Image: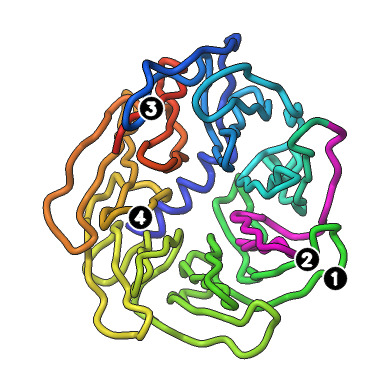
Amino acid sequence: MWRRLAVCALAFLLCAHPLFAKRRAVTPGAPGHCITGRVAIFAYVLRMARDATHVYWIDDFGVLLRVPRLGGNVEELALLEEWLHLTMAVDETNVYVGVLPGEAIFQPRPGSILAVPKNGGATSVLVSGMQTPFAIETDAAHIYWADVGTFDIQGGSIAPNGKVERALKNGTGRQTLAENLSAPADVLLEGESVWFGETGLADGDATVGLYRVPKSGGSVTTVNTTVASATLSQGGDSILVYGGNATADNALFVIPKNGSAVRTLVDDDAILGEQHVADGRAYYVTEGEDGNALWSVPLAGGAPARIRDDLYYGEDFELDGCALVFGTKEGELLRIAR
């Protein structure tokens, strides 16, 4: 079931449909210990990222927008309607967007990473020629990404040619850190290491596991080989992993960094890939017919608690200080207290 659910999720992310809407600025509710409220309206959020001052999102039209994190004027930064946008990240200067060309819906085409200046300016192709860029992270000097591999949307197949790569932020100095992987879907930076997983979704390569490699390149360290590891989050002495194994088809797992016993945190076929950890709790999203739901669960274990059940049909959300930031199916971008 893990393979079927995951491949369907990849296809869905590539084929979202636009809605007709307009956008305008709003202001959150009254200040308090945790400032919450409506940050923007007509915000149909598919991809989201944030920095210290703004929330950034890509909507159903393929428009990249931003708004001050506590509300204010909504700015349109770029129109990306010719691309299938898969992932995004923000640093001090740019928004980085991993994309495929629109024709990739009909036939596999190589992808690119775009750079969009945060304060306005022309969109540029920073790095090109990867197959399916599905996660981007940045540090002071480099961008890092997971390349799932050649993805045939029509056929629902993934080639076993996934990679983890990096390049300087000017697009030069491209370097392969790990290759010939089975559909890696995420990267996580920690100190001088890059964590990544194999999902086992590639045709003819069922390899799964959690790994780390030095940022500058070198030997890959194997941490776990029992969990199909898709998206990753930092959890102190552990990595929180969305994936599947022999006993839990679609779940969140706590994998200790020292390679000791894996713990299943939540087992639910409706879980989607985005998750975050803060204050000893894991936050995640489940899919629903009438909107997605946002949940939390103690990282140490316990009963999940449903927070909202009206999220838009994307899965991205952000943690912002004391708040959760997400888009609703009514088109509101909200901040609510955690």
Against 91, is 30 above or below?
above
Q: Earlier in the sequence, mark 1 or mark 4?
A: 1
Q: Are marks 1 and 4 in contact (CB under 8 Å)?
A: no
Q: Is residue 234 left or right of residue 290?
A: right
Q: Is residue 134 magenta?
A: yes
Q: Earlier in the sequence, mark 3 or mark 2?
A: 3
Q: Disc 3 designates what residue?
A: 35
Furthest toward the left, the residue is: 303
Q: Are marks 3 and 4 in contact (CB under 8 Å)?
A: no
Furthest toward the bottom, the residue is: 219
The picture places residue 215, in percent across and down from the top left corner, at 65, 77
Q: Residue at x 72, y 68 (%)?
A: 166
Q: CA distance from mark 2 to mark 4?
A: 27 Å
Range of magenta residues: 121-149
Q: Disc 4 designates what residue?
A: 277
Q: Disc 1 designates what residue?
A: 173
Magenta stretch prevailing secondary structure: strand
Q: CA distance from mark 1 to mark 4?
A: 32 Å
**Front one among 14 and 31:** 31
Query: What secondary structure is marked by label 3?
Result: loop
Q: Are marks 2 and 1 in contact (CB under 8 Å)?
A: yes
Q: Disc 2 designates what residue?
A: 167
Three-letter code, disc 4: Val
Three-letter code, disc 2: Ala
Q: Is residue 258 magenta?
A: no
The picture places residue 298, in percent across and down from the top left corner, at 20, 55
